Protein backbone atom coordinates (compact mmCIF):
# COMPACT_ATOMS: atom_id res chain seq x y z
CA UNK A 1 0.00 0.00 0.00
CA UNK A 2 1.47 3.29 -1.04
CA UNK A 3 1.21 6.20 1.28
CA UNK A 4 0.58 9.49 -0.46
CA UNK A 5 1.30 12.89 0.96
CA UNK A 6 -1.65 15.23 1.49
CA UNK A 7 -2.36 17.68 -1.30
CA UNK A 8 -0.78 21.06 -0.73
CA UNK A 9 -3.13 23.83 0.35
CA UNK A 10 -3.87 26.25 -2.43
CA UNK A 11 -2.07 29.55 -2.20
CA UNK A 12 -3.69 32.93 -2.40
CA UNK A 13 -5.48 33.68 -5.65
CA UNK A 14 -4.73 37.07 -7.17
CA UNK A 15 -7.67 39.46 -7.10
CA UNK A 16 -9.75 39.41 -10.25
CA UNK A 17 -8.41 36.09 -11.53
CA UNK A 18 -10.73 33.25 -12.36
CA UNK A 19 -9.21 29.77 -12.57
CA UNK A 20 -10.20 27.00 -14.91
CA UNK A 21 -13.55 25.59 -13.83
CA UNK A 22 -14.38 28.68 -11.78
CA UNK A 23 -17.46 30.65 -12.71
CA UNK A 24 -17.24 34.40 -12.93
CA UNK A 25 -19.65 35.63 -10.23
CA UNK A 26 -20.64 38.59 -12.40
CA UNK A 27 -21.65 36.25 -15.19
CA UNK A 28 -23.42 33.74 -12.92
CA UNK A 29 -25.52 36.44 -11.28
CA UNK A 30 -25.88 38.05 -14.67
CA UNK A 31 -27.83 35.11 -16.10
CA UNK A 32 -30.52 35.46 -13.46
CA UNK A 33 -30.55 39.20 -13.98
CA UNK A 34 -30.74 38.63 -17.77
CA UNK A 35 -33.80 36.44 -17.28
CA UNK A 36 -35.45 39.12 -15.15
CA UNK A 37 -34.50 41.82 -17.67
CA UNK A 38 -35.98 39.80 -20.51
CA UNK A 39 -39.20 39.37 -18.53
CA UNK A 40 -39.38 43.10 -17.76
CA UNK A 41 -38.41 44.04 -21.32
CA UNK A 42 -41.15 41.71 -22.54
CA UNK A 43 -43.78 43.38 -20.35
CA UNK A 44 -42.60 46.83 -21.46
CA UNK A 45 -42.66 45.64 -25.09
CA UNK A 46 -46.27 44.53 -24.68
CA UNK A 47 -47.12 47.95 -23.21
CA UNK A 48 -45.27 49.73 -26.05
CA UNK A 49 -47.10 47.55 -28.54
CA UNK A 50 -50.55 48.16 -27.08
CA UNK A 51 -49.82 51.91 -26.96
CA UNK A 52 -48.80 51.97 -30.61
CA UNK A 53 -51.79 49.89 -31.72
CA UNK A 54 -54.33 51.89 -29.69
CA UNK A 55 -53.18 55.41 -30.59
CA UNK A 56 -51.14 56.89 -33.43
CA UNK A 57 -50.26 59.93 -31.26
CA UNK A 58 -48.09 58.07 -28.75
CA UNK A 59 -44.83 58.01 -30.69
CA UNK A 60 -43.11 60.62 -32.84
CA UNK A 61 -43.99 60.72 -36.51
CA UNK A 62 -40.87 60.38 -38.63
CA UNK A 63 -40.55 61.60 -42.20
CA UNK A 64 -38.01 60.50 -44.82
CA UNK A 65 -36.64 57.58 -42.82
CA UNK A 66 -35.43 54.46 -44.58
CA UNK A 67 -37.07 52.14 -42.04
CA UNK A 68 -40.28 54.12 -41.68
CA UNK A 69 -43.29 52.08 -40.55
CA UNK A 70 -46.74 53.14 -39.50
CA UNK A 71 -46.98 53.53 -35.70
CA UNK A 72 -49.56 50.74 -35.63
CA UNK A 73 -47.08 48.44 -37.39
CA UNK A 74 -44.45 49.29 -34.77
CA UNK A 75 -47.07 48.53 -32.14
CA UNK A 76 -47.61 45.02 -33.51
CA UNK A 77 -43.86 44.45 -33.82
CA UNK A 78 -43.28 45.44 -30.19
CA UNK A 79 -46.29 43.46 -28.97
CA UNK A 80 -45.16 40.20 -30.59
CA UNK A 81 -41.52 40.79 -29.61
CA UNK A 82 -42.59 41.58 -26.04
CA UNK A 83 -44.52 38.34 -25.72
CA UNK A 84 -41.58 36.31 -27.02
CA UNK A 85 -39.12 38.17 -24.75
CA UNK A 86 -41.29 37.45 -21.72
CA UNK A 87 -41.61 33.75 -22.50
CA UNK A 88 -37.86 33.39 -23.08
CA UNK A 89 -37.09 35.33 -19.88
CA UNK A 90 -39.33 32.97 -17.93
CA UNK A 91 -37.60 30.00 -19.57
CA UNK A 92 -34.19 31.33 -18.54
CA UNK A 93 -35.33 31.72 -14.94
CA UNK A 94 -36.66 28.13 -15.01
CA UNK A 95 -33.31 26.89 -16.37
CA UNK A 96 -34.78 25.54 -19.63
CA UNK A 97 -32.14 24.27 -22.05
CA UNK A 98 -33.76 25.96 -25.05
CA UNK A 99 -34.05 29.35 -23.36
CA UNK A 100 -30.40 30.37 -23.23
CA UNK A 101 -29.67 30.12 -26.95
CA UNK A 102 -33.11 31.47 -27.78
CA UNK A 103 -32.46 34.35 -25.37
CA UNK A 104 -29.28 35.33 -27.20
CA UNK A 105 -31.07 35.23 -30.56
CA UNK A 106 -34.19 37.11 -29.41
CA UNK A 107 -32.10 39.71 -27.54
CA UNK A 108 -30.08 40.28 -30.73
CA UNK A 109 -33.29 40.68 -32.75
CA UNK A 110 -34.64 43.05 -30.10
CA UNK A 111 -31.41 45.05 -30.19
CA UNK A 112 -31.66 45.46 -33.97
CA UNK A 113 -35.37 46.36 -33.86
CA UNK A 114 -34.80 48.93 -31.11
CA UNK A 115 -31.89 50.42 -33.06
CA UNK A 116 -34.16 50.83 -36.09
CA UNK A 117 -36.85 52.27 -33.77
CA UNK A 118 -34.47 54.99 -32.48
CA UNK A 119 -36.08 57.98 -34.27
CA UNK A 120 -39.48 57.18 -32.75
CA UNK A 121 -38.41 57.04 -29.07
CA UNK A 122 -34.64 57.70 -28.78
CA UNK A 123 -34.24 57.41 -25.00
CA UNK A 124 -36.23 54.20 -24.56
CA UNK A 125 -34.66 52.68 -27.68
CA UNK A 126 -31.15 53.33 -26.32
CA UNK A 127 -32.10 51.90 -22.92
CA UNK A 128 -33.47 48.78 -24.64
CA UNK A 129 -30.32 48.45 -26.78
CA UNK A 130 -28.14 48.62 -23.65
CA UNK A 131 -30.30 46.05 -21.83
CA UNK A 132 -30.19 43.71 -24.82
CA UNK A 133 -26.41 44.04 -25.03
CA UNK A 134 -26.08 43.10 -21.35
CA UNK A 135 -28.47 40.17 -21.78
CA UNK A 136 -26.43 38.82 -24.71
CA UNK A 137 -23.19 39.12 -22.72
CA UNK A 138 -24.64 37.47 -19.61
CA UNK A 139 -26.17 34.57 -21.51
CA UNK A 140 -22.96 33.93 -23.43
CA UNK A 141 -20.62 33.96 -20.43
CA UNK A 142 -22.49 32.51 -17.45
CA UNK A 143 -23.27 28.98 -16.32
CA UNK A 144 -26.82 27.67 -16.78
CA UNK A 145 -28.99 26.68 -13.84
CA UNK A 146 -32.59 27.06 -12.70
CA UNK A 147 -33.29 30.07 -10.50
CA UNK A 148 -37.00 29.52 -9.77
Image (tube, grey):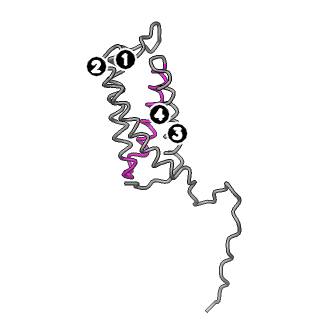
For residue 54, the mark is 2
Q: x, y (%) of residue 41?
A: 41, 35
**Which span of residues is magenta-colored?**
91-118
Residue 96 is labelled as: none
In percent of width and height, residue 9 lies at 67, 74
Q: Sequence order check: which comes first, mark 3 or mark 1?
A: 1
- Circle 3 sits on which residue? 134
x then y, percent, for residue 70: 36, 13
Q: Nearer the viewer, mark 3 or mark 2?
A: 2
Tell me if label 1 and label 2 are in contact, CB under 8 Å.
yes
- Residue 35, given in percent of the width and then of the height, sits at 42, 45
Q: Residue at x 32, y 17 (%)?
A: 72
Q: Who comes first in sequence, dot 2 or dot 4?
A: 2
Label 4: which residue? 108
Q: Residues within 10 Å of mark 3 (few under 14, many from 20)?
A: some
31 lies above or below 66 = below
Gap between marks 3 and 1 measured at Cα? 28 Å
Amino acid sequence: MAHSAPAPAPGPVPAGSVGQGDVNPWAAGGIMFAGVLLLVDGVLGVIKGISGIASDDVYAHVRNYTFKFDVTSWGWIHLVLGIVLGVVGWGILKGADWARATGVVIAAISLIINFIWLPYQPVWALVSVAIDGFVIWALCTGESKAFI
